[in-house]
Image: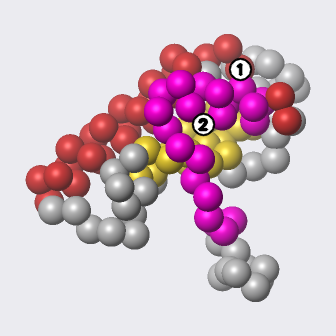
Amino acid sequence: MTVTVVAILETDFKPEKALAKVMNDRLQNAARDLERVHLKSLFGRGFQSDDLIIYLSYNPKYKIRFRIVNDVPADIEYFVAECCGRLGYILWRANAIGVSKDGTND
């Protein structure tokens, strides 16, 4: 299994420039640590073609949120949710990325 964690630096809100730099650095570090340290045990698990892609971003209250953006088995989804929960990250509850509310692609 290949694990990829992507820091989504653009948010729905615009923090001040100095704060945005600190927030973006923190988010990139969190993505790197989640991928290389906390989810390290998932590397090599399953078939070679299996991928796990996670997006990290901020919510308007400056909390880190996560979202698995591809289909993975339930045990992998649970493991990621447990790991992210221990790190204080919250589940990113929103429409699917690239899909509008009526279900059509943007």
Height in image: 93 above or below 1?
below
> Which residue sits furthest top?
41
Q: Quadrant of residue 74?
A: top right
Q: Secondary structure at mark 1?
A: helix
For the N terminus, give its image quadrant. top right
* Three-letter code for the amino acid on which mark 2 is drawn: Thr
Residue 35 can be seen in this image = no
Mark 2 burial class by Cα count in 10 Å: few <14, some 14-19, many 20+: some
Q: Position of residue 14 (x, y in %)?
A: 27, 68
Q: Secondary structure at mark 2?
A: strand
> In the drawing, does residue 68 fall left or right of residue 84?
right
The image's mark for residue 42 is: 1
Residue on which the image places disc 2: 4
Q: Is residue 65 magenta?
A: no
Q: Residue at x 65, y 27 (%)?
A: 82
Residue 86 can be seen in this image = yes
Q: Residue at x 59, y 47 (%)?
A: 91
| Region rendered in magenta | 76-97
Height in image: 19 above or below 81?
below
